[in-house]
Image (tube, rainbow, N blue to C red):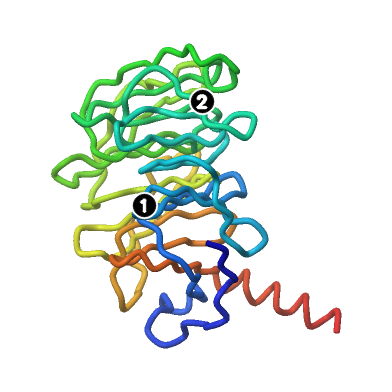
């Protein structure tokens, strides 16, 4: 499955109020994650792919969920067994999770089949040992994602929560704060940007995030005319999956204009 980038620029209906310039990427995925300059995904057959030089390269193994970020590359299989990608191979570690997130400051977060939350502190993620110990958190969420300012989660009722005072050496944090809105899934990027998708397939961005206001101030709906089931963001690119598994890569308009001007100046 080697796919070149589609040249079709989706300017009819798939632009987000001029904020993003979107391209359809050939291939199908059921889950995708971008972080620390890399992009990984898995398809309906649980095959694993990495985005390299504008193409999907298959990685040996089978996973239902994969995550890449400062904590490395992690994933879980259909039996909820947890794996870390190390020395170009998957190493299993103790525990069972249905979803993991490597976006924290070299610490790992995750959720099990009962929506219980766990984290793995930095000393464990950087260790080359397969013997690690997960720390349980209070609360219950179905999706959990971390970034430089803290972690975000959504529960079974699609309510949104932020976990305060999460640190690499103490990844459990101290308290939850309820955040307005309703999302089915949420993702935090390496730079702290937060995006999510609601139950209707609409995509939202959290605005006003800063060190002083880590939960931000408001949600902005991105005006796509189609629905999506999954979103992730890194390095100026928004990656989206629609309900059929089609892959879209959307570049922020300002960044696209800057790059286009730079290319023209070299001609």
Coordinates of residue 210 in the picture (x, y in percent): 49, 44
> Tag 2, which secondary structure?
strand
Residue 151 lies left or right of residue 91; in this view the side is left
Residue at left offset 39%, top offset 23%: 119
Position of 177 relative to 133 (above/below): below
Q: Nearer the viewer, residue 150 or 58?
A: 58
Return the residue nearer the eye: 174 or 47. 47
Residue 60, image x and y in percent? 53, 42
Instruction: Name the residue beneath numbered marker 1.
Output: 45
- For residue 99, above or below residue 252: above
Residue 83, x across and y down, in percent: 45, 29
Q: Residues within 10 Å of mark 2 (few under 14, many from 20)?
A: some
The residue that disc 2 covers is 91
Q: Nearer the viewer, mark 1 or mark 2?
A: 1
Left or right side of 223 for 121: right
Please name the residue shown 69% across and 73% down the image: 258
**Residue 76's quadrant in the figure?**
top left
């Amino acid at each position: 499955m080697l796919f070149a980038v589609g040249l079709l620029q989706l300017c009819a209906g798939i632009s987000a109020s001029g904020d993003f310039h979107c391209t359809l990427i050939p291939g199908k995925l059921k889950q995708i994650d971008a972080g620390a300059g890399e992009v990984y995904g898995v398809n309906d057959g649980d095959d694993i792919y990495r985005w390299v030089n504008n193409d999907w390269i298959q990685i040996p193994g089978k996973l239902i969920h994969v995550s890449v970020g400062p904590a490395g590359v992690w994933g879980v299989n259909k039996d909820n067994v947890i794996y870390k990608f190390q020395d170009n191979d998957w190493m299993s570690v103790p525990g069972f999770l249905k979803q993991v997130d490597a976006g924290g400051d070299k610490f790992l977060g995750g959720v099990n089949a009962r929506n219980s939350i766990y984290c793995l502190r930095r000393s464990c993620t950087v260790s080359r040992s397969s013997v690690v110990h997960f720390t349980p958190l209070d609360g219950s969420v179905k999706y959990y994602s971390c970034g430089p300012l803290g972690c975000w989660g959504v529960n079974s009722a699609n309510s949104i929560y932020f976990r305060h005072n999460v640190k690499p050496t103490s990844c459990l944090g101290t308290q939850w704060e309820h955040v307005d809105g309703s999302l089915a899934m949420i993702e935090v990027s390496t730079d702290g940007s937060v995006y999510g998708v609601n139950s209707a397939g609409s995509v939202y961005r959290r605005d006003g995030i800063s060190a002083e206001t880590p939960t931000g101030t408001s949600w902005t709906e991105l005006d796509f005319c189609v629905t999506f089931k999954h979103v992730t963001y890194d390095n100026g690119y928004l990656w989206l999956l629609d309900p059929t598994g089609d892959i879209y890569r959307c570049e922020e308009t300002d960044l696209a204009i800057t790059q286009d001007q730079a290319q023209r100046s070299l001609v």
